Image (tube, grey):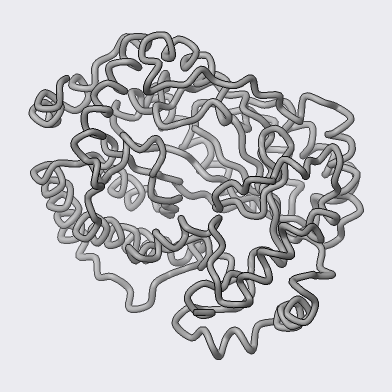
Amino acid sequence: MLEKNFCSSPWFHLRIDTVGNYLPCRWGSKISDNTKHNIANTSMVEYMQTDIMNSMRQELLNGDSPSACSFCQYEQSLDKVSGRQRQLLKSGIVDSRFDKTFCSSPHWNYFQYSYDNQGQTKEHPVDLQIDLGNTCNSSCIMCDPKFSSRVAKDQTQLHKVNPILFKSPAVIKNWTHDQKLVDKFVNELSELSSIKYIHFIGGETLYMQSFYDICNRMIENGTAKDAIMGTTTNCTVYDERIENIISNFKEVHLGLSIEAVTPLNDYVRWPSQIDDVISNIKKFLALKEKHDMFISLRITPNVLSIYHLDKLFDFMIENQITAESCDILHKPSCLRIELLDQNLKQDVINKLESLVNKYQLTRPVDKIINRRMDKKSMDIITDSVFEYINFLTHYKEPDDIEKERKNLVEYLKAYESIHNNKILDYLPEYEEFLRSNGY
């Protein structure tokens, strides 16, 4: 089972979450004892040597699949590029030629050492995902209070409207609000010559002072010049300070989170205004002409936004922006694509197939794992289009589909009661589907 389950990520990657807790993976599920290790009491190098990381490496080398890896396994079962495959590529390992590329991997000695030493490693982190906190100017309906202060505020009200669907949000203490922890983090970075890639997320990073402070300190202490910096924005903010940051890092990867190029985006990512979002996207594209940076549209379609996915792909093609589909949305469960009724699902498939015919798209023979290559943007978009056609054609409906469809209606009605909007103003095609489930 090694070729099906192995992932090289725990040998070079770690994540720090909103409150400063360490996690072994940017994609993985939370692990029960992750709160034992926090940036306040553990360094990044020390976390790489902890029992939780050693155990995960040992499981993977034994051909097992740790529970934290279940989501990548689900994505791969639907022929979608997973985080596991992306991390394997960083080790020179390709699924389709696993045996050969595993043995020839430049990280082979790392794996061998861990195999001989109960999962331990002497390696330092190279690839980081850093959650800066939940400060955000948007209340996206699929988001969670731990990622958005505005969602946290809304869900305090939503809990009163529907206490069954909405829990009262816990108070989030952003680790970046503690200057001592920020200093500790920046100092550790300056001592880690190994760092090749650091991705910042929020909240909304371009809205957060900590993003600019940490990046500028990395520039001042020389860490930035050898590192690729990535971040993700909801495109509601354009701050000119980003221009100085872009020019001082080795390279910058900018992900633009958007779910539709129609006003539906304003409903899903409330209270965005699509005209402002498109205007900011054009500003980012103009920056790309002057600096060494990679830009992609990062999408996570839900049961609503999937209906306008063809228009979003059309926008990508017309503007030559690479598609980077993040993952298959599974929380909140009532927003999963898998809840579509048969008629709407077929509508979406038909529209995507019309896009294929419009541009005469032909799926590449080999699946493209590295999706951060401008020169292959059309192939990557094409691959993504066919991935969603395949997903829609083959996904399995949840056992509790009727219950979840009714939850979807209650969920939307609750949000609409505080956002003062109506989904049918944005998606009139969903009237029969939603009315039949109590809307």
Q: Is residue 255 above or below residue 104?
A: above
| In this rendering, position of residue 59 left or right of residue 430 | right
Q: Quadrant of residue 231?
A: top right
| In this rendering, position of residue 356 left or right of residue 245 | left
Q: Position of residue 69 (x, y in %)?
A: 53, 59
Q: Residue at x 37, y 62 (%)?
A: 80
Q: Position of residue 321 (x, y in %)?
A: 42, 51
Q: Position of residue 382 (x, y in %)?
A: 31, 62
Q: Give the camera-side residue of 350 and 143.
A: 143
Q: Is residue 318 above or below residue 400?
A: below
Q: Give the camera-side residue of 7 and 200.
A: 7
Q: Residue at x 47, y 21 (%)?
A: 167
Q: Residue at x 23, y 24 (%)?
A: 409
One can see residue 39 in this view: yes
Q: Is residue 214 above or below residue 159?
A: below
One can see residue 246 in this view: no
| In this rendering, position of residue 94 left or right of residue 398 | right
The C terminus - image quarter = top left
